Amino acid sequence: MYPNQARKTRMKDRRIGTSTYTQCLLAVMAVILCIRVVETTCLMTQDFCEYWLEVEYKLTMMDYKKAVYASVGKLYHFDVENPQLVTPIDGSNVITADGWENQRLVITVNKTIPGPSIEVYEGQTIVVHVTNKLLSSGISIHWHGMHQRQTAWSDGVTFITQCPILPGQTFTYRFVADRKGTFWYHAHTGAELSMGLFGPFIVRERRPLQRDEFIMTIQDWNHDMDSELLHYRMLFGNYKNRVKDTATRSLEGGKFSMFRFHSGLINGKGRYFYPNGSCIEAPLTVFTVSQFKSYRFRTIGSASLYPFRVSIDGHLLKIVATDGNDVSPVEVESFIINPGERFDFIVDANQAVNNYWIRAETLEVNVSNHIALAIFRYANASNNDPQTKRKLCTPTDRCRVANCPFKYYPASADVNCTNFNQFQSAENKTVPGVETETENIEDMFLNFAFPGDKETPGSANGINFVMPHVSALTQWDEIKTLCTAKDCGEDKMCQCTNSIELEHNKVYQLVFVNMGIGKGWNHPMHLHGHSFHVLKIGYPEYNNVTGEYIKDNLDIDCGGNIDREKSFCNYAKWTNRSWGGNNIPGLQLSSPPLKDTVIVPTGG
């Protein structure tokens, strides 16, 4: 088994690359299995790379027109009564997800979830033809992390940079992969991402690999049948047998939404756990390694809502990059990845030949088995499930966890947090505006929250964004719903197409806020077209024993209601009016890390 087989074996019979080849493998019992594999990686010497993606519906746990079920990590047709007496099916055509036997409607790219990995080299021109084969829904594809310099029309945001790709239509994206790193492509229409419309997009330097690599996508999974149902259950409530689901909470007390977590998937595979602790023994993703070699994992947070704490039993992880930007190495027991984030880590296969669990657990409290699993398998180990356990964190051997969205874990957890503002860029890049007079730097406050009474729509500074009815990039003058923050007011909601005008070549200091009556869980913010330096993260006040939230960070004056917990925080500003630009205590102006997706703490 070659090092990246866990990723490449899903790429059979897929129309994506410009070259194909046939590979014949000798299967068990002298059966010859011929697989037509499509090359998904652009050659280093090429300047131009072309791909075709087809987006269509499919049902999970179906082998063409026959239902399947899982047993001991294998798949069998629905009419097999005793799986010990028959050979399991190949399963390469089956989207297993978590093995749940009631077929779920999903959106696939080239018939897979995740979609095929597109792997190119820095500086290459990428052309991707996307065909919408859905029945009635429009789509678009966002290239998450690509700056799209001079190709904004390829950013892939419906009604912002393009009109939706309607059923039966094909749209061509063309852009230059001008920065190396781990990125991904995903739906940017409605909640289609939650139904499976995404895949990895990797840009490598034009030089031989220093070590073998794996790509690992981590997502939450839900059995609801379509994105609209999922969205409205999340907004208005999720009921089952006259019992309403209550939102779960994170370690510091932040409340998640009504999006019900059924399971977690790694590279599209996972296991559904029943309330009694047993699980469906569906096939899992296997990463096969050779002892005493090191590997780079490119990890993509492809979840819809939940953050995951990622670890490999018995192995330390060395984080070397995030969101396509190199950082000074940080060695940890585990790290937390949020939706949209990417983390690259190096792991040494320096343990005994065996099978080890890769775990990705949500940050929820008072829940069981909210986890995604995969197998870290040494060559020549058995094909059995691992029997390993996660490291036990103790007062004398504490665990180090990177990218905590809160300041610290409860004292009883014996965990030391390395918050993201403690990371440092591996490159000595100048922070824009460091040498600039403070008055020439504009602080821009954006409070992302969910204020309101009966309905609590997401908003920025109290404005619930209304999508234009035309492509804003090409038909700006036709938008009739434009507004600015000045058009709204304190402690009320507005609905319009929020537009912020920027001056070219001016330095802006963005202050993302998650405060007031509508503050949500620790949630990610992604900026299209740019990376930004993370200079400071201001956390709320916590109980230093339990780690629970007490009150909002007092550096921010929310304005509005005199009771800051009831304020909508539509007009946030510094409490200390002398602060601004570089004149803010605690700014990390020396080699701060670069991100395009950052987590705003609850109350911070």
Image (cartoon, rainbow, N blue to C red):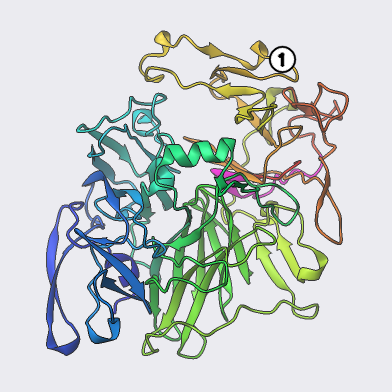
Residue 32 quadrant: bottom left
Of the pair 540 and 343, the residue shown nearer to us: 540
Q: Position of residue 301 (x, y in %)?
A: 50, 54
Residue type beneath disc 1: Gly
Is any part of residue 329 visible from this angle?
no
Of the pair 322 and 110, the residue shown nearer to us: 110
Is any part of residue 273 visible from this angle?
yes
Magenta stretch containing residue 594, yes or no? yes
Secondary structure under the numbered disc 1 in the rendered image: loop
Residue stretch in magenta: 585-598
Report whether 59 appears left or right of 12: right
Report whether 443 appears left or right of 338: right
Magenta stretch containing residue 482, yes or no? no
Residue under the point 72% across and 62% down: 417
Residue occupied by mark 1: 489
Residue 416 quadrant: bottom right
Residue under the point 69% across and 47% down: 255
Quick one: quadrant of the N terminus? bottom left
Q: Position of residue 429 (x, y in %)?
A: 58, 46
Overall secondary structure of the magenta section: loop
> Looking at the picture, does residue 401 appear above or below residue 177?
below
Report whether 45 appears left or right of 499: left
For label 1, the crowd category at 10 Å Cα-Cα, with few meaning under 14, some 14 to 19 and many 20 or more, is some
Q: Position of residue 513 (x, y in %)?
A: 70, 35
